Image (spheres, rainbow, N blue to C red):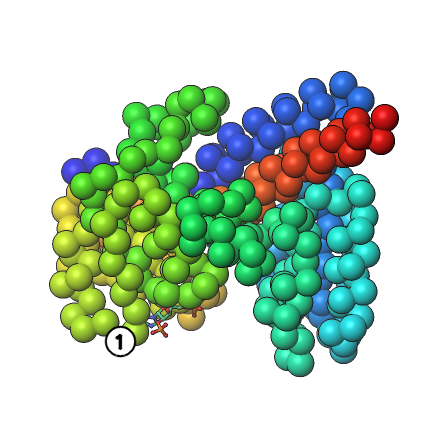
Amino acid sequence: MTCKILNGNWLSEQYARGVGRRVEALVKSGKRPPGLGVILVGDNPASLAYVGRKEKVAKRCGFITKEERLSGAASEDDLLAVIESYNGDPEIDGILLQLPLPGGLNADRMLDKISPSKDADGLHPLNQGLLMRGAGMLRPCTPSGLMRLIDLAYSDVRPEGDVDIEKDIPEVDLSGKSAVVVGRSILVGKAAALLLLERNATVTVAHSRTKDLAAVTSQADIVVAAVGREEFVKADAVKEGAVVIDVGINRASSGKLVGDVAFDEVQGKCSAITPVPGGVGPMTVIMLMHNTFLAYEQHLKSQHQFNKQAG
Ligand code: NDP
């Protein structure tokens, strides 16, 4: 079976081109550019690298970025002051609070303070509640990004050259398809399950207490692995022709980054698979920009409305 490699680097670049073009046109017409406000607490090397990558992609999309770095000894009040300054900053449309936070800082309490209209990560309880309702605009980035990779899997598009994303890679209806999500975290598994349901897939959520996991996943047309265990999903746990989405990022003892799926053996069996790195990771980053752009459009609209009412 020919297996389609779902190249997230390519797909995210297609998004960046599209967003960049729209921003360029808006700025030419006299509008301000979208703004991303980044908050980094402490000096975790992985977080530093992630933030650097996100800022680079934001610039590629034509956004301005502001960055606030706090020491690892910062208090919740220090962090709150930065969040509030971004909440009130008219040049900032999306706020990125890089996780994990150093010990002593409660991530949920801090995420709750981000203005829901600037919640670029889609992790504010209001936006999560709207997601439950099948509504809302700012959805969590990793689950949204992996949905677009599933769309790529079912499209005729080969991940090469330039495409018009909306036209060439439409959102697919997954009626009649079964999907198994392995992992039930708020960040990935639960939200991915909701998005798959929204597209009419028949969804099973598996986790560490699931009995005979391979028997469950091997029935599925779509497998999403968000476990955090190196090469955990093997070929015998995957149905012939399935679409396999690997969210995991694990550092192997060799130092190499590997996913939750045993890529080499599974790719011989499935119809489409995401690589690690270069699959879900870049899509997570570009969905942050997508959300920031959506928030920006909303902010421009509200400003326009306000100006009209103010005469
Ligand atoms: P969590 O640790 O929060 O959740 C892991 C989930 O896997 C839990 O629900 C857990 O079950 C389940 N699990 C653990 N062991 C088993 C097992 N033996 N069998 C079945 N299920 C199991 O991780 P995240 O959801 O935050 O992240 C998952 C992976 O995705 C990580 O590698 C992370 O680095 C990566 N990630 C990648 C992103 C990207 O952009 N590519 C973004 C976010 C995360 P239980 O609930 O029962 O404990």
In what quadrant of the picture does the N terminus appear?
top left
Tell me where residue 146 appears, x and y as whole percent. Answer: 41, 46
Q: Is residue 25 visible?
A: yes
Q: In this rendered view, identify the residue nearer to me: 13 or 168.
A: 168
In what quadrant of the picture does the C terminus appear?
top right
Tell me where residue 249 appears, x and y as whole percent. Answer: 44, 60
| Left or right, 308 with reference to 173 | right
Looking at this view, name the residue that lies furthest to the right.
Answer: 311
| Left or right, 37 with reference to 99 | right
Tell me where residue 234 appears, x and y as whole percent. Answer: 22, 60
| Left or right, 72 with reference to 192 | right
Q: In this rendered view, identify the residue nearer to me: 29 or 17.
A: 29
Residue plotted at (43% across, 50% down)? 133
Residue plotted at (17% across, 61% down)? 216
Residue plotted at (38% across, 60% down)? 189
Mark 1, Cα crowd under 10 Å, few <14 / some 14-19 / many 20+, is few
Q: Secondary structure at mark 1?
A: loop
Q: Mark 1 near ligand 1 (CB under 8 Å)?
A: yes
Looking at this view, name the residue that lies furthest to the bottom.
Answer: 104
Does residue 156 lie above or below 248 as drawn? above
Does residue 30 lie above or below 85 as drawn? above
Residue plotted at (81% across, 56% down)? 85
Q: Amino acid at mark 1?
A: Arg
Q: Which residue is mark 1?
A: 209
